[in-house]
Amino acid sequence: MSLRSPGLTKRSATLLITVPLFSALLVTSAVTARFSMSSEVDHIVSHGIAPISAPNGGVAVAVQMGDRSLFYNYGYADQVDKRPVTSDSLFNVGSVRKIFEATLVAQAVLRGELKLDEPVAKYVTELHGDYIRHVTVRQLVSHTSGLLLPTDHPPWPTERYSLAGFYDALNAWTPSGGEAPGKQRIYTHAGYILLQLVLERRYGKPIAELLDRGVIAPLGMTSTVVPERGADDRAIMSAALLQRAVQGYARDGEAIGLPGNQQSYFDFPGTGQMFSTAHDLARLLAACLGEKQIDPQLRQALLATQREEFRVSPQYGQAMAWEIESPFGVTVVDKPGGLDNASAYVGLVPDRKIGIAILVNRGDVHPFEIARSTILPELARLVTPHGQAVGSASR
């Protein structure tokens, strides 16, 4: 929830560059290695990330260029002990979690276990309100349900929902501006909380287990978890993972929460955020771009989530969790996420086989703006459609 918003072989070559508070790791095959392009990518990423790099925070970046994974790290995971950010630092990824739930939905549809146009009330039988009983699974996963609870927009409320209170709010909800199911795109965190309940009811298992079995483990994402939230709003996870969790910060450098901080307006299981690393998100990028050997049905599901479900404007569309933009002549499929102490972004340029993940332990920056306007368009100029390198790749 947002409160604002390839396998390696023995022949693989590894390049490590380290400078103060900055490191870059390139993983590439001998067949496709092109140091000139690598230098271009290094420049594009470092130049693009500079505006969101600050003394009071750190940034971890993963870039996928065809079958190559590159990692860049800036700043500190914790200012007090001067622990540097690494590609294995654990970040709260906020609403990037929605990509994973959308993938579960797509898998269920492919297996014939769920239909997109079924009403959600078929699974969450407590829902009987005049509006909510007409909302479908497709509308939840594509943000076209029309729902907009107080938890979805500022001014942020102070109260939280119990499960029973959530049902009451959904049953009582009526549109204030003529909204109708499927007729508009309105981003709603509450809609994905409801989608979580649909999946849990359909399979009789908690969402964390469904996500792990369906997506996380099959992609080999060994540091990606959806933990429960403890009494101190700190994620309940292993000591090994917690030691890698970053400290979150506000603009002025004030620490917000403890490392592993989770935030939610919903007081029932499974409603906290997902945590992940740049290394793990590189696996997601590679899978989404077809550069990782995975189960064919999971591959189909990942592709299905990237297809447009609703056209918002000439330059903007909504897919299943993913958003679709066309800045500067390239099509970007992406998903931002964030809290008041964390910012995350995952973006793809599918026809160029390019992907990027950006993780920041500050809540006042917006990596999606930089990725869409600068980094991804510039990376796209280095390759032709379908991911072939352009000539000398010179700037």
Image (cartoon, rainbow, N blue to C red):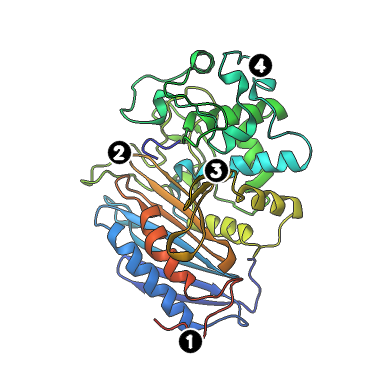
Disc 3 to disc 4, C-alpha distance: 24 Å
In this rendering, the answer to whether 274 lies above or below 159 is below
Residue hosting label 3: 321
Which sits earlier in the primary sequence, circle 2 or circle 3?
2
Residue farthest bottom in this picture: 392
Disc on res. 392: 1
Q: Quadrant of residue 369?
A: bottom left
Q: Earlier in the sequence, mark 3 or mark 4?
A: 4
- Mark nearest the camera among 2 and 4 is 4
Q: Look at the image and tell me in which quarter the C terminus lies.
A: bottom left
- Asked if 166 appears above or below 76 in the picture, the reply is above
The crowding category of the residue bearing disc 3, from other C-alpha atoms within 10 Å (few below 14, some 14 to 19, many at least 20), is: many
Residue in the picture at 47% in, 74% down? 381
Gap in angstroms between the C-alphas marked 1 and 4? 60 Å
Closer to viewer: mark 2 or mark 1 = 1
The residue carrying mark 2 is 256
Disc 2 from disc 1: Cα separation: 46 Å
**Does residue 86 appear in the picture of this structure?**
no
Residue 309 locus on image (x, y percent): 60, 43
Relative horizontal placement of residue 135, taking residue 54 as reference (left or right): right
